[in-house]
Amino acid sequence: MLEPKIYSVSKVNSYIKNMLERDFVLNSIWVAGEISNFKRHSLGHMYFSLKDSDSVIRCVMFKGDADMLPFMPENGMSVIVCGYVTLYERSGEYQIVAQLMKPDGVGALTIAFEQLKAKLEAEGLFDKDYKREIEPRPKNIAVVTSPTGAAVRDIIKIARERNSSVSITVVPVLVQGEAAADSVAEGIRLANRLGKADTIIVGRGGGSIEDLWAFNEEKVARAIFASQIPVISAVGHETDFTIADFVADLRASTPSNAAELAVNDINEDRKRAEALLIRLERNAESIMRLKQEKYGRLVESRAFRQPYIQLDKRKEYVNSLIGIIRKNAENTVKHEEAVLKGALSTLEALSPLKVLSRGYSYTENELGRAVTSAADVNEGDRLSVTFMDGRVSVTAAEKVMFDGKEN
């Protein structure tokens, strides 16, 4: 009997892995499903599962391929991935190594646009509180765009027509391709470093969403937000909207419109100045006419032609006031005199001298204290008796109390 050949687990897993990777169909396969259990590793690799109503398959997308995605996968998102099926030998689980991924039904760029828009809006980059006023009468405009495109020619042409005194600084950048976002962001920073522009116009002419994609990149949005100089976004046509439009201080529907918004029309300014001058002259004439009419009425008035009549009326009025004041003063004095006389009568009636004049006297002991009772006096005490017309010093010779007792 032949002995069976025994394999290790590792050998079996390795054999299955080789079979899977040599299979023609499984070597390059497209699989549709819904993302679940999505996780992005700190190294940049993406781990997730694809599922349908009946089954689940594990997937991995390594950093190099993940970095090429224009959008960020999320749980619940329906996608189609392209890759190859292999076995993860350590766990014995087979998985798809995804090399490409695209949304199922909605374009990847559209999803990337909405994801970045939501992210930056949550951070406040679109808030009106951060929007700055565009300089109404600039001296210099910086234009961050392709130096050879139609956009820069349109901007220069319209700016010159509106106000030839405004200088234009063209900051040449790439507006399409993989390096465009870095180029545009650096162009915005360069315009700030130059420091002579009052306004920055950043944009390009029309194109597909792929052509305009540089202006949907996060690095361009953050460069616009960080700009110390107000920024006008002018990307594509009127119906085109980019992330740059939401972050910029002002959105222009086209590059030509950006020039109109950035540069004041000197002819319109001149017309407004002339209209203002005409209004000032008319207002001045109207004011002078009103003043002359008022002067005429004053000159013709009776008060101006016969001022003494008014003076006599004023004099009569003043005299009447003097008479009223004098009468009020006299009445007040009479009333105060009557009050004073009444007070003097009351004081006189209460005066000690009035009492003394009726035969009474006032007695004090040697200490100057009033003696009001016989009990306060002893025989031999020296007393001072005050009368109406003088004072007498006496010595108490005898003391008799009203109860009949002698002391």
Image (cartoon, helix red, strand yellow):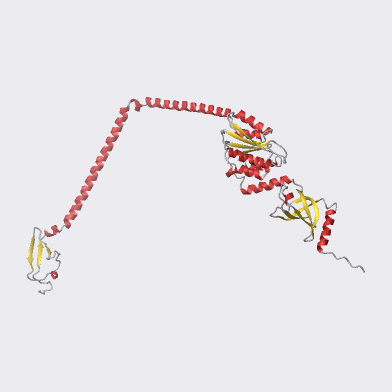
Q: In this picture, is 342 found above or below 261?
A: below
* Whether residue 52 can be seen here: no
Q: In this picture, is 135 found above or below 337?
A: above
Name the image quarter holding the N terminus: bottom right
Q: Residue at x 20, y 50 (%)?
A: 340
Looking at the image, which is closer to me, 253 or 88? 88
Q: Residue at x 40, y 26 (%)?
A: 295
Residue 279 image point, x, y percent: 51, 28
Q: Residue at x 7, y 62 (%)?
A: 392
Query: As drawn, is 298 to the left or to the right of 383?
Result: right
Query: As drawn, is 367 to the left or to the right of 300?
Result: left
Looking at the image, which is closer to me, 31 or 12? 12
Looking at the image, which is closer to me, 391 or 121? 121
Q: In this picture, is 375 found above or below 40?
A: below
Looking at the image, which is closer to me, 116 or 353? 116
Residue farthest to the right?
Answer: 1
Q: How many marks?
A: 0
Quadrant in which residue 372 is drawn: bottom left
Query: As drawn, is 363 to the left or to the right of 159?
Result: left
Residue 176 image point, x, y percent: 70, 39
Q: Residue at x 29, y 35 (%)?
A: 318
* Whether residue 15 can be seen here: yes
Quadrant in which residue 7 is drawn: bottom right
Query: As drawn, is 36 to the left or to the right of 130?
Result: right
Name the image quarter holding the C terminus: bottom left
Residue 199 image point, x, y percent: 59, 36
Q: In this picture, is 374 found above or below 289?
A: below
